[in-house]
Image (cartoon, rainbow, N blue to C red):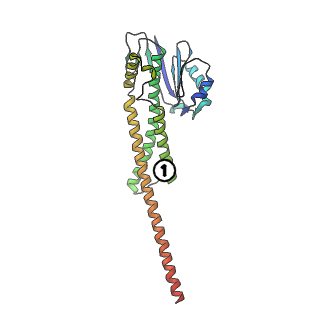
Amino acid sequence: MMMKIKAIQIADAINIKACKSLIQSIFLHADSDELFFSPKTGSYIYVLKHGVVCYAAVAEEEQQNFITQISTTCRQLRGGESVCSEVIEVHTEALQDQISFDHITLTTGSPEKLRLVMLNLAQSVALDYFSGISERLLEDTRIHTTYLERKGKLDISGKTLKKYIARILNIKNSVSENLYIFDSPEITWEDEELNNLDRELKKNFDLKDRYRNLHEQLDITKENLDLFKDIMFHSESSRLEWIIIILILVEVVDLFILKFLTS
């Protein structure tokens, strides 16, 4: 048996509690971060708070209907070409679990195994999403560093710089809060087969290395912005020093003029 599993980043974040109240289904797994349920026999939907929804054996029309249904629970709902998504084929009823680049073979299509596949695929899509944001921020800082190299000064205002720094910190916080690449789900703790599957899925999607690369990229961008901040602070300090010097000179000249007029 073959089914397609698709993960898509539909928003910046999803309010899981509000989303749960809109879904008329029995949940196979539900907590403050995730919802996993079967809308009908043989199909599954996985909703994660960092804005990713994953579908297994769900028709395109039903996927769109579900997004419309939960749209009010989404922050910054996304669409069009900017949406990050991944699709993978899963074959079941095999002799052993095997994972390759473009498809996955499982001994059974149990909800536990499918949930692991969907979770890791969703984490992969989220990494692509955050990496895209990080790359754009790094490119922006590269433009400013090039200008600094050519002109010897910055072409960015203090307010804009603060926004960039806040953006980086928010992304780092979101990555740390929402992507648990190094943690295995509870269902793998007491089942060796599921634990092995989870480990192989992480390896196949290269999640750990991509996670580290994302953090390194964010750290580099943050270092550049901190350098800009230091340069700007030094420039402001120098300006203040000159203002103070000029004020002192004006005061001295004023004293001389006053002394000359009274003599």
Name the residue at 62% across, 25% down.
21
Question: Residue 126 in the image: x percent, y percent?
Answer: 47, 31
Q: Position of residue 17 (x, y in %)?
A: 59, 28
Q: Nearer the viewer, residue 246 or 91?
A: 246
Mark 1: amino acid:
Leu
Tally the numbered discs: 1
Disc 1 packing (10 Å; few <14; some 14–19; many ≥20): some
Q: Which residue is mark 1?
A: 161
Q: Nearer the viewer, residue 45 or 102?
A: 45
Image height check: is 244 above or below 149? below
Left of 39 or right of it: where is 164? left
Q: Position of residue 167 (x, y in %)?
A: 49, 43
Question: Circle 1 — which element?
Answer: helix
Screen quadrant of the N terminus:
top left
Picture residue at 44% right of the left edge, 32% below the top: 127
Among all residues in the image, which is located at the extreme bottom? Answer: 263
- The quarter holding residue 96 reads top left
Q: Is residue 193 above or below residue 67?
A: above
Does 252 sit above or below residue 180?
A: below
Q: Residue at x 48, y 50 (%)?
A: 161
* Residue 103 image position (x, y, % from top left): 41, 18
